[in-house]
Image (cartoon, grey):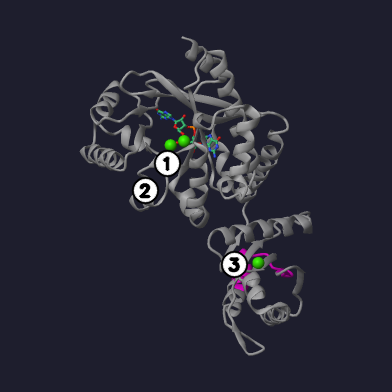
């Protein structure tokens, strides 16, 4: 069997106490590991704070787990290094060779995969490799790989969903929503890839591309249909928003596409604001100075809705779909929407009701004096040709 071990807090310890202590911690860890093992077992340091242990002649997974538990317990005791008490813990992945022809490097990779899972599940624990784990990791790696190439291969497409005036049902603008024409799968929705793109950072170039493309498209439509007042809403992810030069990027895009700043709306969520709490206000004020309005997306689902409202310069609330689609069936949801609407009115903000699917829902929102609506009742997100046809009609 192979155990793949990674120290959970090594970087923290190393940064706060310096390299000397870091080295000592690695040596002390190796000694403790060694002390728990039989003479015929092998410990090797893989580099960084990773160790590999080869347990000779272990054929039963429970025996390997016993060893992992012993190591886990031993390593959770504090170290005393040059007068500092240092606490650490380990994450362990276990892989067992079931067949003789299983290559050593396969086993190592499987143990590494299991270790990674142990980290994800909260650290200071062990996980045993299984093939399902392997399949999901392979799938994820494949998706990451495909995502990295998708921009240069021009596989992304922007779809556009109309935002209408509830009063007249006339289109005032669109929300840009990304789609991915994956080379071997069907047209993918954001739910299939946005979270991975966010984790890997791929969302930054992807988001830039969407912003550029949506601005370019809107300017084309404004000229083509003499529709200067049409607006475009674009979703900004937290990673995008945290770039120090995001305002410059946006200014650059507006200039390149010759789009008026008042035509562009940026949709951000409360968690994006919270994750960038220190810079958010200044950033949002800069955008407002340019003439760009901020829409607070998915409003009502966040944890701090009320507190962020008066602290941050947002212009429009987008009431989350989950409130709208139950508004006729749930008194409680209806009351929440009423409260949100009066909140918006008191703060002098407009509101957009997301996910309106039925006439009843639209009538309710009309009664509540919600200015804008968006949803399948008016139109699903459309590709650029269908959206253009809708503007023309
Ligand atoms: P969102 O910003 O809340 O966008 C609205 C979502 O609700 C869209 O899903 C839209 O198709 C869907 N929707 C609109 N009306 C209705 C309705 O009446 N009924 C139902 N059931 N759904 C409706 P979509 O296009 O799948 O996008 C999902 C999410 O992915 C978006 O949620 C947004 O958070 C994210 N996303 C989409 N495009 C981008 C992008 O370019 N950048 C970033 N960062 N995120 C994006
Ligand atoms: Ca580590
Ligand atoms: Ca949105
Ligand atoms: Ca939303």
Q: Secondary structure at mark 2?
A: helix
Q: Residue 214, position in %: x, y?
A: 57, 28
Is residue 207 shown to the viewer in this render? no
Residue assigned mark 3: 62
Q: Alpha carbon of mark 2 to alpha carbon of mark 3: how far? A: 54 Å
Residue assigned mark 1: 296
- In the image, residue 219 lies in the stretch drawn in magenta: no
Q: Secondary structure at mark 1?
A: strand
From what the image shows, is residue 286 above or below residue 65? above
Q: Which residue sits at x=75%, y=80%?
A: 39
Query: Residue 180 falls in which quadrant of the image?
Result: top right
- Would you say the residues marked 1 and 2 are in contact, meaning their CB atoms lie under 8 Å apart? yes
Left or right side of 284 for 140 = right
Is residue 275 shown to the viewer in this render? yes
Q: Residue 354, position in %: x, y?
A: 38, 32
**For mark 1, does the 10 Å Cα neighbourhood hold few (<14), some (14 to 19), or many (20 or more) residues?**
many
Q: Nearer the viewer, residue 84 or 170?
A: 170
Q: Which residue sits at x=54%, y=25%?
A: 159
Q: Nearer the viewer, residue 186 or 151?
A: 151
Q: Secondary structure at mark 3?
A: helix
From what the image shows, is residue 329 above or below residue 96? above
Q: Nearer the viewer, residue 143 or 238?
A: 238
Q: Which residue sits at x=66%, y=43%?
A: 144
Q: Magenta residues?
A: 50-68
Q: Alpha carbon of mark 1 to alpha carbon of mark 2: how far? A: 9 Å
Q: Residue furthest left?
A: 331
Return the disc, 2 or 3, that comes first in the chain's sequence.
3
Disc number at residue 309? 2
């Amino acid at each position: 069997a192979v155990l793949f071990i990674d120290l959970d807090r090594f970087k923290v310890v190393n940064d706060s106490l310096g390299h000397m202590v870091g080295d000592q911690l690695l040596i002390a860890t190796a000694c403790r590991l060694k002390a728990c093992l039989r003479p015929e077992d092998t410990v090797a340091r893989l580099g960084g704070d990773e160790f590999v242990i080869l347990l000779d002649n272990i054929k039963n997974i429970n025996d390997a787990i016993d060893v992992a538990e012993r190591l886990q317990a031993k390593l959770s005791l504090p170290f005393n290094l040059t007068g500092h008490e240092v606490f650490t813990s380990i994450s362990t992945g276990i892989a067992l060779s079931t067949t003789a022809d299983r290559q050593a490097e396969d086993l190592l990779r499987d143990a590494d995969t299991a270790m990674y899972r142990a980290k994800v599940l909260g650290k200071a624990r062990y996980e045993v490799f299984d093939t399902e784990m392997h399949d999901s990791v392979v799938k994820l790696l494949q998706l990451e790989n495909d995502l990295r190439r998708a921009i240069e291969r021009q596989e992304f497409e922007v779809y556009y969903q109309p935002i209408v005036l509830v009063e007249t049902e006339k289109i005032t603008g669109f929300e840009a929503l990304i789609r991915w024409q994956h080379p071997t799968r069907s047209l993918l929705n954001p739910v299939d890839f946005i979270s991975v793109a966010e984790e890997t950072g791929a969302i930054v170039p992807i988001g830039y591309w969407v912003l550029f493309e949506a601005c370019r498209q809107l300017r084309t439509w404004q000229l083509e249909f003499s529709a200067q007042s049409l607006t475009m809403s674009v979703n900004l992810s937290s990673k995008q928003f945290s770039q120090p030069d995001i305002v410059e990027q946006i200014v650059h895009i507006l200039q390149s596409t010759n789009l008026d700043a008042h035509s562009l709306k940026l949709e951000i969520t409360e968690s994006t604001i919270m994750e960038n709490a220190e810079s958010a206000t200044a950033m949002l004020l800069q955008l407002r100075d340019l003439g760009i309005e901020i829409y607070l997306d998915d409003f009502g689902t966040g944890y701090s809705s009320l507190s962020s409202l008066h602290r941050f310069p947002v212009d429009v609330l987008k009431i989350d779909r989950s409130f709208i689609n139950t508004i006729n069936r749930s008194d409680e949801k209806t009351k929440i929407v009423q409260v949100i609407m009066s909140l918006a009115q008191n703060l002098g903000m407009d509101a957009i009701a997301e996910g309106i699917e039925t006439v009843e829902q639209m009538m309710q929102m009309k009664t509540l004096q919600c200015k804008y609506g968006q949803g399948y009742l008016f139109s699903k997100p459309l590709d650029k040709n269908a959206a253009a046809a809708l503007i023309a009609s």
